Image (spheres, helix red, strand yellow):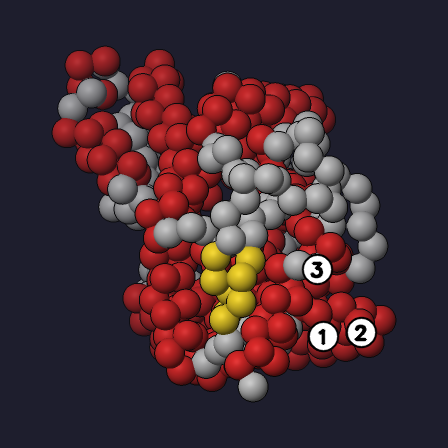
Amino acid sequence: MGNEMNARGATVDRSTDFSRNNLDCLRLILASTVALFHIYALSTLPAFSAFGKYLSPHFAVRGFFVISGMLIYRSYTRSSSIRSYFEKRVRRIWPAYFTVVVLAGVGLCFLSSLTVSRFFGVGFWKYLVANLLFLNFIAPSLPGVFVSHTFSAVNGALWTLKIEVAFYISVPAIHYLCHRFGAKRVISVLFVLSCLWKYGFALLTSLYTSRSLFIMDKSRSIFEQFETQFPAQLAYFCAGILLLLYFDKLRSHFLVISAITAILYLLDHALGHEVLDIFWISGIVLVFGFWRYLGNFSKYGDFSYGVYIVHWPVLQILIDCGIARLHPAMFLFLSVCSIGTTAFLLWHLVEKRFLATSSHYCQRSVKESGLPMNTPRVLFISPDGGLSRSTTGRNE
């Protein structure tokens, strides 16, 4: 029985089909979706209303979380130690994050309505410390910066990073519980509990909103804040883990999964409550990511993270310069070019330099279907809790 479970657990990590994926391409599409939506949300110009109407940042962010569930859990099972795992996570997100936060904090003093001495006061240090600790909600704005904008936040897109960090921290505990009680049971329980949290607070938010119509209280309720934070988003992360664990079974039914995904999408939008989005978002990630391999999309670099963390301050700066109101078309052109260029530079000057040597971005000479000679072999857990040996691979 043990050998059978080991064999079943090894099928995912040894599958060429998993390594040949389109997840880098999908992540860039999702990051670009968020950026285009914010072009409208931050500028509020009618010329970009189509972005606000047809693009969904909620879908994009939740899609990121599903992908993270697949790749981060896989990265942990392929790491030689917990220390190695956390080192890879820090190398991947911290250098670029640190660079963006610090450069924005210092550079935006030139756009502040305050003097330099007043700008670099308590408010500046509060912003810097809070944001470097992923506590962006404590100090989202800088003194005298973007005060006349629709949103004064320096980088409102960073709120999801603390949730990603929470995912990273939770993975070792999830993996241990899967080994102890079985992956299928543990992931299913976490998924259900997260859904109860999410939809429970969604119901409370709905009740609070109905009540606020009469008391004229338009502030964002504590229920709505809880609805969007870590415990609620864990369901999407768990969905990604389940896609990973059952990948070899699911990959044989892409056509059926595509049809089910389309039906759930239409049904969910007909209901208008996003009750089924976990399922159709997971379906989109699986089908787009693995059905037809589109090639090594990231051979020139992975710009999705850069696009996501730089687009907001870039848009805010362009809006502050008055370009959006004067020339909407020019604003759109400069926004796309500026975000793309900044993400490109961030990748080559910062992100790539700090990646672990085991990252596939650092192994251009290795064939996509091959394995590095120095790849460590570590434990992988099957859906039934069995252990097998695995190796490092793509998307880490």
> Gap between marks 2 and 1, in whole Å?
8 Å
Q: Earlier in the sequence, mark 1 or mark 3?
A: 3
Residue indicated by mark 1: 249
- Mark 2 belongs to which amino acid? His
CA neighbours of label 2 inside 10 A, class few (<14), some (14 to 19), many (20+)? few
Give x and y (percent) for residue 310.
50, 31
Disc number lying in front (3 or 2): 3
Residue sticking out furthest to the left = 122
Q: Residue at x 36, y 17 (%)?
A: 107
Q: Residue 15 carries which label?
A: 3
Label 1, label 3: how far apart the Cα atoms are: 12 Å
Relative image position of residue 46 (x, y in whole percent): 66, 41
Q: What residue type is labelled 3?
A: Ser
**Image quarter hosting the C terminus:** top right
Picture quarter containing residue 101? Answer: top left
Q: In which quarter of the image is the N terminus?
A: bottom right
Helix, strand or loop status at disc 3: loop
Q: Position of residue 5 (x, y in %)?
A: 57, 78
Q: Residue at x 62, y 59 (%)?
A: 13
Q: Pick whichever, 227 or 316, lies toward us.
A: 227
- Is 201 displayed left or right of 324 in the figure? left
Q: Is mark 2 on a helix, strand or loop?
A: helix
Question: Is there CB contact under 8 Å for labels 2 and 1?
Answer: yes
Is residue 163 placed above or below 191 in the rendered structure? above
Vertical order, 198 against 220 (above or below): below
Q: Give the residue at x 65% y 79%.
A: 271
- Mark in the foreground, 2 or 1: 1
Asked if residue 162 shows in the view, the reply is no
Badges 3 and 2: C-beta atoms under 8 Å apart?
Answer: no
- Give the amino acid at mark 1: Lys
The residue that disc 2 covers is 253
**Residue at the spot x=67%, y=75% of the render?**
268
